[in-house]
Amino acid sequence: MSSNSDFLTSPHGSYQEAAEALAAAQSRYVANNPLSKKQHELAVESLPGGNTRTLLHTSPFPLCMKHGKGTFVWDEDGHKYTDFVGELSAGLYGHSHPVIRTAILFTFDDIGLSLGSTTTYEARYASLLCQRFKLERVRMANTGTEANLHALAAARHYTGKRKVVVFNGGYHGGCFSFGGGKAAPNTADKGDFVVVQRYGDEEAAAEAERVIEETAKGGNLAAVLVEGLQGAGGCLPGSKGFLLAVQEAAKRASALFILDEVKTSRLAPNGLGQELGLSPDLVTLGKYLGGGFSFGAFGGRKEIMDSVYDPRVKGSLAHSGTFNNNTMTMCAGYAGLKEVFTEEVCVEFNKVGDDLRERLNDVAKGTRLRFTGRGSLIGLHFREDGTLESQERADLRDLFWFEMLERAFWMTRRGSIAMMLDTPKEELDRFVDAVSRFLERYAGIMTL
Ligand code: PMP
């Protein structure tokens, strides 16, 4: 291994060493996971690339999970992992929470699937969501993507305008992705989006104010859509000052301010927006609020929601969706939020996350690894000089991923952790230790 001083005098040595370590880790992965490999070879015969959810593709082949229990998962080859993927935040309750189980069994046995009618269960859950997240009205959908789709439709219908200001690194669903400073090719109504190039800080606020004002001058700005913490964008929190400035700029421009809380609603008892003193016109929700089933919701000011979506109002928009009010989601989501993820539990849970991140950043001091996020959502960053502004080191990120699998932690390869409730403290301690060992083992390439 090259020493630190070798790295300083010979930067390429570091890349070479990382490449060798990565190749070795990948070979061990292939050797350790023959059944996942075999499954992938079968899957490519019917799914493009063996995949139906792009994020889960990892080369040379993805790990194929067989089952999960509590906060652990087991792969096809029989390895057990602590689940830090946490289904990208939707898996808050773990794989087999007893309250969710009871709600599911009760729904199946005593209510039944697909009643094809309104039910008391949807109204009951709507009332809880409104109360918890300070919404005057809410509507259900099936995914966070759909929630944003309908919230944008509402903003366009309400304002009679089309354009939407979003932020670099923002992710609002499978067809609303704004990494790399521009709308992804598969963005719905791509031409309607104007992307602010920065996110989160004072400079970003100034740029956002300018872009919002300029776009509004064109007379066609319907909404500003933003996350309080960019989840898919790397778990990067927006500062309170930034978010308030964006909200005010949207108001000055008579555009609706839409806060995407699909990921962040779990970060504070009434959602991150309430915690930061924001007052969005519309909020979008999803993930864990389906109790483990697919879910989305959008809501906010009644003046907007009623005029756009009340079917009794002439000219209102249709908002259809066979599964919008499906009994399983309405009951499991309700049980989870009412009985398990109470406001008190939310506060305690996120404290555990803050504490974990602090410990991780302590062990990572002076290295290329940095942990970001807020509460129970954590982002991992591998950067050339350890700052978020410096160049990303995908090679180190991949090496870390392979190594953490060997140490029995299931994580996203892009580097994110969405904690589950009830993950044993020993597992969190074990992770801090594993990170520390990784940094020691690869000191030659990880230490600054
Ligand atoms: N908004 C945000 C902030 C998200 O993180 C996601 C999903 N990662 C979505 C919207 C889309 O949710 P879904 O995957 O349920 O469509």
Image: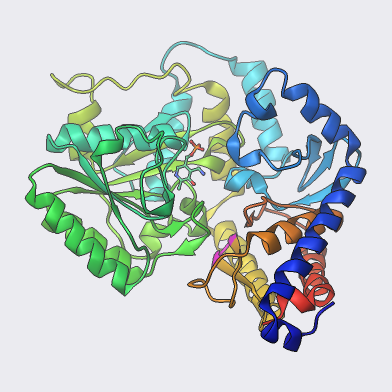
Q: Residue at x 74, y 74 (%)?
A: 13
Q: Residue at x 71, y 82 (%)?
A: 7
Is residue 265 a member of the stretch shown in magenta? no
Q: Quadrant of residue 10?
A: bottom right
Q: Quadrant of residue 141?
A: top left
Percent x, y of residue 29:
85, 48
Prevailing secondary structure class for the magenta stretch in the rendered image: strand
Q: Image point 72% across, 24% down: which residue?
A: 44
Residue 9 figure quarter: bottom right
Q: Position of residue 356 (x, y in %)?
A: 67, 70
Front-most of residues 443 and 68: 443
Nearer to the camera, 317 or 303: 317
Range of magenta residues: 373-378
- Image position of 123 (left or right of 392): left
Q: Position of residue 362 (x, y in %)?
A: 67, 81
- Residue at the outermost top position: 116
Q: Height in image: 168 above or below 396?
A: above
Q: Give left or right: position of 134 versus 255.
A: right
Q: Residue furthest bottom?
A: 5
Q: Is residue 229 visible?
A: yes
Residue 408 in view of the camera: no
What residue lies at 22% left-to-right and 45% top-to-bottom? 223
Q: Is residue 360 above or below residue 68?
A: below
Q: Nearer the viewer, residue 153 or 275?
A: 153
Quadrant for the N terminus in the image: bottom right
Query: Where's residue 312, x and y in %?
Result: 19, 19
